[in-house]
Amino acid sequence: MKHPPGLKGFLLALGLLLGLLVLATGVALLGYLALEAYFAPPGWTLLLLALLVLVPGAILIGRLFPWLTDWYYFLPALSFLLVFTLYPIGLTLYLAFTDYSGAKNGFPDRSTETRVVKQEGNRLTLEEPVREALRCDPCRGEPVEVYAEGHRARAKVLEAEGSTLLLDRALPFPAAFVAKVNAFRFVGLKNFAFILSQASQALLPVFAWNVVFAGATVLLNALVGLVLGLILNNKALKLRNFYRTVLIVSWALPGVITVQVWVALLNYNFGAINRLLGVLGIYPIPWLNDPDWAKVAILLVNLWLGFPYMMTATLGALSTIPDELYEAAKVDGATPWQALWGITLPLLEKPMVPILLSSFAFNFNNFYIIYLLTGGGPAQEGRLATAQATDILISWAYKTAFSAEGQSAYGLGAAISLLIFLLTVAISLVNFRVTGALREVR
Amino acid sequence: MKKALAVLALGLSLALAQGKITVWTHFGGPELEWLKAQARAYEKTSGTKVEVVEVPFGDIKQKFILGAPQGQAADLVVSIPHDWLGEMAQAGVLEPMGKYVTQSYLSDLQGVAVEAFTFGGKLFGLPAFAESVALIYNKKYVKEAPKTWDEFLALARQYTTGSTFGFLYNIGDPYFNFGFFKAFGADNVFAKDAKGNLDPARLLLGGEVGEKALAFIKDLRYRYNLVPEGVDYGVADGAFKDGALAMIINGPWALGDYKKAKIDFGIAPFPTPPGAKNPWGPFLGVQGVVVNAYSKNKTAAVNFAKTLISGKNLVSFNQAGGRIPVSKSAAKTLEKDPVVAGFSKVFALGTPMPNIPEMGKVWGPWGNAISLAVQKPDSNVKKIVEDMVAEIKKAIGK
């Protein structure tokens, strides 16, 4: 059988390989769990079991579809893709519809740990009244974990009466303790409803600033990069390699460090910049303390960090424009200004547009400059503590998932990331459509 | 050769039998040295290997909660502040300690500290040392601690000059500001229910209390002109270390650096702010040692924790870093120490920081409100407090 042509063949091959990998993982997991009932198998058993399925499976499929064997070189890359890209995406998608958080993490709540004094089949007698010990009301249907040295098992409460507890299954070992499980539940669209109910305090202003931030950064950086690139491209300029090296320094230094230096430089009373302005007789500017000035500060620091990239890109693009064009223009009597508008800029457009688009996409989720420079602050009236004056969507999601809202609200954070994903896709589609960047590729 | 192999095998099996425990710590400098010395001593007496790993303070809670069930967290942590306790216990990663310790062991520890490490009626850690903020003054400028607000203000104004500062502190951080909320009437962040447990539905920071406290904090910047814009922890701490600051609100963790900088300092409570009905009183924080519920070597971990939290070792710990132990016998030995004596007076005014998980939902909006209040001279304190209370209530869901 020959390789099926085009997209169909590609998808078929990919589907077969991914199916094989998923099958091998699934069988290995089931086998591992089955073995666990008898003894504690070491972690690498999983890998061994997976290989036991994968290798014969690969040979078998290779017999059925002989053309597929060339694709086996993809297997290592595909397994990485599965583990580090597809699995986290799937998990995020799943968590966005649950109330998973630090306190509702599916693990037993040890503060409800209670000693089991008597055990008859699936009826346990606890040291204290169930309702108070396990802090559940009603206790019916509540998941619990029962454990003893070396054993643990999950069960559901069927009935709780005084200090006796009726479980939905009998335990294969003598129980020592029982604790309530902090189960997380499927909540449907509740996370999204929560985000939208606070849209005017978080989602909308943060989204607006996010677009302004990414757009203004790209425009500013491109403009400065373009001007500097044009100047440095002038062969009559002396020492131009020296200038180029100096101008690239801010790009070469690690941003994680330089941004924090900027925080110190921009301090209202103690920063070098306001002191310098003071010498010039200008009132100190609340760079990081005022909601509007903080936005300006972010754009300026990001310009400082980002223009060398645009400058280098411009220089690279300029070197592809043949000199003959300029010579011909000169012969025709065009001024340098006309040559710039008539030759340079139109020819720069094509190589620069994809760079500008990717730069926009990058800055749209440029977490670290926001996090390091202002931490999303300063505070702004009428906004949530997680969505302050300079927070962009991704820093808002980070704060929600990992710092504020308490107890690490992963479910909510996942829902926000999902919204960001949808917004970014929408913006990218509009971008591509407007600029026709995709048409060039075809 | 065979004999050598046999000995090797025996050695290996012994090492495996006695195992190894991992300790996470956020200590640094001399305190880290102290912990490492304790670990070596414990290795010698018990034969269990102890590995000390440094983890940044801010990462510990998150890493521990996520890593413990996967077997990727330390067997014990030295140390966590007690306000993380509820969250970590509820996440199921802390081993209840009640079954390992005797009443006589606990009786050497101060009651407040044991209570701070109790959540839902169970002991989840062994308290080691207490901390709170206090007014720390440089004796070069301030001969005697100010007892009233007027004395304080006069001193602070006297030294607020072009080159020195009278009074600075980390004004944006609620932890450093709770004392003012307490002075204006908030006994705690939440009110207690009939059983004496904190009730997350009853927030005490709002209303008139919050407005008055925020107005006072705002006045520190715009009316008394003491704490200018741009002051954060680093600026205030640095100025005190440089000897350019007369008074600061800070805690015991900073004292090692002040000693190193050869600052002659004193410790006192902050005077009662003008118009407040109660005395100022800080958050009392207790730090302690906790054991991983998923540890494979709990007995060794608990035994090491108990060795650390003993009167004798806490005295040597105090000598290493200057922290104030909660062990009664250690406190007795250290009676004459000016830092221990100074902070003991401040602790008496303090309120233990809430250890229920809902506290995690308060810090963000609370800090936001304080930052807003001190952002500009005409900030609307009433509106800020209302927004803060609304956001906290919505997050807690009650």
Image (tube, coloured by chain):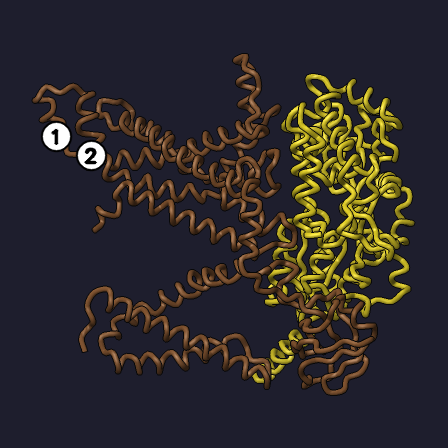
Chain colours: A brown, B yellow
Q: Is residue A256 among the parts visible in the rendering? A: no
The residue beneath circle 2 is: A347
Q: Is residue A393 left or right of residue B52?
A: left
| Three-letter code, disc 1 | Leu
Residue B152 picture location, percent across and down:
83, 24
What residue lies at 80% left-to-right and 59% top-to-bottom? Answer: B118
Chain ID, mark 1: A
Cα distance between the residues tagged 1 and 2: 11 Å
Chain ID, mark 2: A
Q: Nearer the viewer, residue A12 or B7?
A: A12
Q: Nearer the viewer, residue B184 or B66?
A: B184
Q: Is residue B17 above or below residue B174?
A: below
The reply to whether callout 1 and callout 2 are in contact (CB within 8 Å) is yes
Q: Residues within 10 Å of mark 2 (few under 14, many from 20)?
A: some
Q: Is residue B375 left or right of residue A390?
A: right
| Three-letter code, disc 2 | Leu
The residue beneath circle 1 is: A325
Q: Secondary structure at mark 1?
A: helix
The quadrant where residue B120 appears:
bottom right
The quadrant where residue A366 appears:
top left
What residue lies at 57% left-to-right and 61% top-to-bottom? Answer: A187
Q: Is residue B340 above or below residue B216?
A: below
Q: Nearer the viewer, mark 1 or mark 2?
A: 2
Q: Secondary structure at mark 2?
A: helix
N-terminal of the pair, mark 1 or mark 2, is: 1
The disc placed on residue A361 is: none
Residue B237 picture location, percent across and down:
70, 33
What residue lies at 85% left-to-right and 34% top-to-bottom? Answer: B268
Residue B74 picture location, percent across and down:
65, 62
Quarter in which the N terminus of chain A is drawn? bottom left
